[in-house]
Image: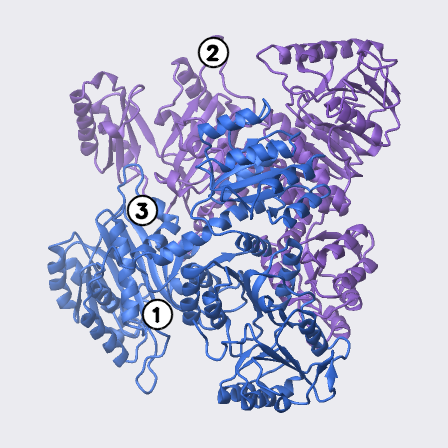
Chain colours: A blue, B purple
Amino acid sequence: MTVRNLDHALAPRSVALIGASERPGSLGTLVLGNIVSGWFAGAIYPVNPKYTVLRGLACVAGVADLPTVADLYVIATPAQTVPGLIAEIGAAGGRAVVIITAGIGSQDQLRQRMLAAAAQYGVRIIGPNTIGLLAPLVGLNASFTHIPARQGSLALLSQSGAIISTIIDWAEAEGIGFSQIVSLGDMADVDVSDLLAILADDPKTSAILMYLESIPDGPKFMATAQEAVRRKPVIAIKPGRHEAAAQAAQTHTGALAGADGVVDAALRRAGVVRVKHLEDMFTAAEIHARFKPLARGRVGIVTNGGGAGVLVVDELLDRGCIIAELAPATLAALEGVLPDNWSRSNPVDIIGDAGAARYVAALLAVADDPGVDVVLVMNCPTALAADAAQGVVSVVENGLINGKPVLATWLGQHAAAAARDMLNAAGVASVDTPSKAADAVEMLTLWHGARARLQRDANKHEVVTVDRAAATLVLAEVARQSRTMLTEPEAKTVLAAYGIAVPRTLTVDSVEAVGAAATDLLAGSAAVAVKMLSATLTHKSDLGGVVLNLASAEAAQAAAQAITDRLAARGVFDQLDGFSVQQMIIRPSAEELLVGITTDPVFGPVMMFGAGGVSVEVVRDTTMELLPVDAGLAEDMIGRTRVSALLAGYRNRPAADHQAIVLALMAVSQLVIDFPQIVAMDINPLLADAQGVVALDARIEIGLQDEAGATSGRAPAL
Amino acid sequence: MTVRNLDHALAPRSVALIGASERPGSLGTLVLGNIVSGWFAGAIYPVNPKYTVLRGLACVAGVADLPTVADLYVIATPAQTVPGLIAEIGAAGGRAVVIITAGIGSQDQLRQRMLAAAAQYGVRIIGPNTIGLLAPLVGLNASFTHIPARQGSLALLSQSGAIISTIIDWAEAEGIGFSQIVSLGDMADVDVSDLLAILADDPKTSAILMYLESIPDGPKFMATAQEAVRRKPVIAIKPGRHEAAAQAAQTHTGALAGADGVVDAALRRAGVVRVKHLEDMFTAAEIHARFKPLARGRVGIVTNGGGAGVLVVDELLDRGCIIAELAPATLAALEGVLPDNWSRSNPVDIIGDAGAARYVAALLAVADDPGVDVVLVMNCPTALAADAAQGVVSVVENGLINGKPVLATWLGQHAAAAARDMLNAAGVASVDTPSKAADAVEMLTLWHGARARLQRDANKHEVVTVDRAAATLVLAEVARQSRTMLTEPEAKTVLAAYGIAVPRTLTVDSVEAVGAAATDLLAGSAAVAVKMLSATLTHKSDLGGVVLNLASAEAAQAAAQAITDRLAARGVFDQLDGFSVQQMIIRPSAEELLVGITTDPVFGPVMMFGAGGVSVEVVRDTTMELLPVDAGLAEDMIGRTRVSALLAGYRNRPAADHQAIVLALMAVSQLVIDFPQIVAMDINPLLADAQGVVALDARIEIGLQDEAGATSGRAPAL
């Protein structure tokens, strides 16, 4: 995907540095030094009225004095000069600018003026407040990093310049290189999604690493991230995991949906691998710089120490990785080359005195096993640590043996460091602990899973049939009355229109009519409930406005009279609009579930599913998914909850109707997509048992209408 | 604590090496080389009939030829020679032997003969199959490690020699030293507990690290580990976390209690800090080699990069660590020394261009804050990384500023490695990522918490009053009948004797008597249940032998008749012993809990507590604790379960009677201690609500008696 006016910015043929300098310690000096120190072959134009020559290059006084239009402009001048410079660049025909300058704020209108100038000419801005841009494939470091980045195939996008410095400092020591590095800064114009779109298309980029502190435009991010993940691995670290949901919420779903939970759902949905620790970014870089992702990762382990093997097996099983079962032929081959006391199973313990020859023999045998997808070779330090590493180096070609990735784990530091340097220098993937080895094995296979989930056929199992007109009728009437919260019967009517079973409910306007309604309902159920109806009084139970378990028409009518008397006694009789008479549902062995909708300010409508009932906030067994939710995603959601174990049946209890739950989640998804004015919703409990599902209670909240009659709220679903 | 005949073994004044050699690559050569390469000042006696001089030392032919008794004998000769050598050493007066030799098995009686010889003379054996023993404080490396260990204050015990090599290799590079290192090997005689006891007493050991693959004697380990933890931190890695419970179980508790869960409970109970990853052992070593443990760890953070601060805050909050709130005076002091755009809160972001001076000023201010217990200083790589590290080195004394521990985290590798080396060389604690920094902060405070839990007054809140005679009567009768499983009424009688409420139950032997019993019970409850009694038929429900919710004496009697008829129809009428008539308990808002006992082969009786009911195996919300369980431990158990959130009350539901649950756990603990023949038990469900607890169903299993009349089973509780 191309992004307007950024065509040549990431691999420019010419770069102008406005604010270039030779004053020690200034940003203009640092950036110019980095640009001229590389092997960038394009034209370099320093711009600064104080100089005529800088670092041997002709320096011009202003943008207008440049001999030609540069592909990329880098600004490192004081904040107040920036809006004017953008206009000058635009007027000169420039279209891509990196603004390193910080402190371009809204209070003094600098930001607004900068953006206005950019809009006038179609100038695209990366930054401000960035450390700059590195294009290692053209030898350009237009940033003030302390070292350049090597050439390679990884792209790195970061909202923190310090994290860029950290990752390239680490990568330099590991011999890992980059295709592109962009410090995103304040993302006043160009945002992470724009760059993600370009990098997704870039054939020289094998994987994309991101450090994100915020995501500015949810739908744009989701679309570009999904597109990128279809082509290559995308790995993100997004801190702020402990931020709580900010807003007060009227629904269980709103109260339970933390901002970070939505981010988690969004990244998972996009297929982006979210990692927690900086180490994981290093592991991702190590893996994706060296290997093609694997569809599956059965691990064969060669170690000179049993303890190391025991530890790594624990770590691998923690992550759900698969310990390969070695074929009889492999065991026989190993029997021929290993000492008598070898382990005779995977992990292959080749004994503490193993040197290069024994490592080589074991590695070749294990890599030859058709049941092994990846080989992990470990060393506990002995006097032979370096010799053993040399053995590994001698049989690994381009990181592989027999086409299979080899991961080396030389434990320790004193003897191990030299061995690891040797492995690194030879291009062998190397980590230094069992847990990092297991992380690396896991990382090898994550992308295939993520991409497969993206490529699943949507809606392959089921289609929800809906009576959209019936729902429209209810929602329009609520909006006409300028209400935001549907009554319970209204909410249930809407759900029923989307195929979700609700208890039969009759709405009547007098005590007398309650009896007849009850007679009707009692023909099909053992008991009814009578509830007050009021557009203004919401806490029905607290007012004594709900009476359950009425087994006769007489009892129902008496209950309605009692409700009337209680409201009269409180002086709120005039707010009683009538009664609902509802069939009582008795399903003693059903599970109580919650299905909810909340609207995230960034990502729009989010569905929540999990264990329901009145204890939902203390049980906290819920999961979230962005809309739309199709059958596959509904099944994923169910599978992520603890309550799914109960739904699957146990002992003498049959499984709940799985398909009915899936359909209910799809129906809610469709409902909220069809009616964007729905901003929040709770179905709690949704009873589920072998007979199907039924929504016992529901709340639906719609956005307020503005004066023009348009409903406020949110962008349409993805 | 002293351990018989090991008084001088760990810091010997003389050492004899049997099998000393100069044959290249042999163990005897490697160990002799390590012994003579150190600064060990005691006598060294090589023993080998093939030599008269080895490495300049007089070599004798046999043990009998030694000029004196050595404090420590090290054996590195073939397996078949070992039993004879032990006898020779014993006869010569030797008492402590490290056997490096592997392959001393039971098949050829070598192991038995070795132990018999040791027993005859009171010789203590470390090993066999060890890499040896290192006593760095006396300059002795009596092992075949590839490098010696530095002098320091950490002790290391390991069942894997490879893990010892790994840890000392890592520690050498970090400048961390040891007081004692013992490779435990097969633990044929001296086990981990013996050495733990000695090291607990050793004033030169500040903390004990352990790598354990198995724990041979649970009660001995618990006693010594608790004693050690009262004095110093004990940290253990125990792999095999994914091993499942081996035995088939008759109880829910048995089915749920995995072997690793019991290990977890045991280590927690002993106050041992169990860590999962090899990195955590390194972190523990780094922390305990350099600092005294802290009672609390409010963290002040100084960083030159905002992104690093954001990442470390996430990591600290993941671990429940506390981010210090800086005092106004601290903020004012920082305002005076930092550039205008500093963060003005904790983490203190001193901006990317910070050098030594700014680091020093910020560190002094933060360490001066009375609300800061530990200082974390971070660096994202810049050209000033080494300069900044030099600044840190200039103000840290013995690892501290203002008496507070300082942890340095220099991110990256290319520029960071040199800075970290500088920090290491100056004795500044240094880790390389935010997650390790957070691990280190957490590690600083874990011991105080563990020790405090050990020192809590036992039974401070409540004492269980019991009718031991009543329980004895039931259990004796069951044993007399050679049964192992109590009937439900028997189990409930036992529980009632220990103060746990059970539904009133009457046992009768005829259909006619059921009516009278029901009349009696219906005076105090709305309904009764009638259940068949049979010592031989166990699946009562499947036989139609249980009828619930009987509201009249007539109905109860009819139900008993129906049960009789059903059994007769199946031809098992003769196995019907009578009926139990039970009060029905209706507590609709009570939680169903499980209290169980299982007997672990290593650790003895273990209590399980958690969510109960028929779905207990799928809900999997349980926790375990070794017996005895006092009030504090009972509260800990409750607090570790998810169901505790429900028990605390929510919405309109009042909290369950916490004290009643605590008392029930204490009562079960007391019961199982009083009657060691009880090997397994389930109370499921134990209903708990605001009115208290009641055991609705219970199973109790006792061990089989042997012919002499003694009950088999287990060692007494701790």
- Horizontally, residue A516 falls left or right of residue B711, namely left
Badge 2 and badge 3 in a common chain: no
Q: Chain of mark 3?
A: A
In this rendered view, identify the residue nearer to me: B281 or B35. Answer: B35
Q: Quadrant of the N terminus of chain A?
A: bottom left
CB within 8 Å, label 1 to label 3: no
Q: Nearer the viewer, mark 2 or mark 3?
A: 3
Residue located beneath label 2 in the image: B706
Q: Is residue A607 above or below residue A216?
A: above
- Horizontally, residue B508 falls left or right of residue B601, namely left
In this rendered view, identify the residue nearer to me: B694 or B44. Answer: B44
Inspect the image, locate mark 2, and give the three-letter code of the amino acid beneath it.
Asp
In three-dimensional space, the C-alpha distance between marks 1 and 2, rounded to whole angstroms, equals 72 Å
Residue located beneath label 3 in the image: A647
x 41%, y 65%: residue: A227
Question: Mark 3 packing: few (<14 Cα in 10 Å), some, or many (20+)?
Answer: many
Check the image and name the residue furthest to the front. Answer: A41
Tell me where residue B321 sits by quadrant: bottom right
Inspect the image, locate mark 1, and give the three-letter code of the amino acid beneath it.
Ala
On residue A717, the disc is 1
SS of the residue under disc 3: helix
x 17%, y 20%: residue: B568
Q: Chain of mark 1?
A: A
Question: Mark 1 packing: few (<14 Cα in 10 Å), some, or many (20+)?
Answer: some
x, y (%) of residue B620? 42, 41
x, y (%) of residue A385? 68, 37
Inspect the image, locate mark 3, and give the three-letter code of the amino acid beneath it.
Leu
In three-dimensional space, the C-alpha distance between marks 1 and 3, rounded to whole angstroms, equals 29 Å
- Horizontally, residue B247 falls left or right of residue A694, namely right
